[in-house]
Image (cartoon, grey):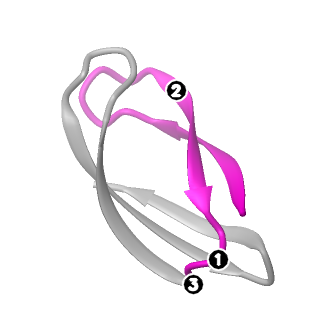
Amino acid sequence: MEEFADIQCPFCGQTFSLAIDVSVANQQFTTDCEICCRPFEVRAECEDGEVVSVEVM
């Protein structure tokens, strides 16, 4: 199951929605900005099918 979280790119500052797999409690992955295409790390914590926190690095 997925839930969307709004995140801000650490490079260009633009905000966009990112799909988070809420079936995984603690996760870290690399994704590309939808605007400037630069890669960055995302940490997400999920509980009970909901995103609890998202950190962009």
> What is the distance, in whole Å, between disc 2 and disc 3 at their CAs?
24 Å
Q: The disc labelled 2 sits on which kind of residue?
A: Thr
Q: For residue 40: magenta? A: no
Badge 3 element: loop
The residue under the point 37% across, 33% down is 9
| Mark 1, residue position | 23
Q: Which residues are magenta?
A: 1-24
Quarter of the image holding residue 40?
Answer: top left
| Mark 2, residue position | 15
| Mark 3, residue position | 25
Across and down, in percent, residue 57 comes to: 27, 54
Q: Residue furthest front?
A: 1
Across and down, in percent, residue 33 comes to: 33, 29
Q: Residues within 10 Å of mark 2 (few under 14, many from 20)?
A: some
Q: Is residue 20 above or below residue 22?
A: above
> What is the distance, in whole Å, between disc 2 and disc 1 at their CAs?
24 Å
Badge 1 element: loop
> Which of the two discs, 1 and 3, sits closer to the camera?
1
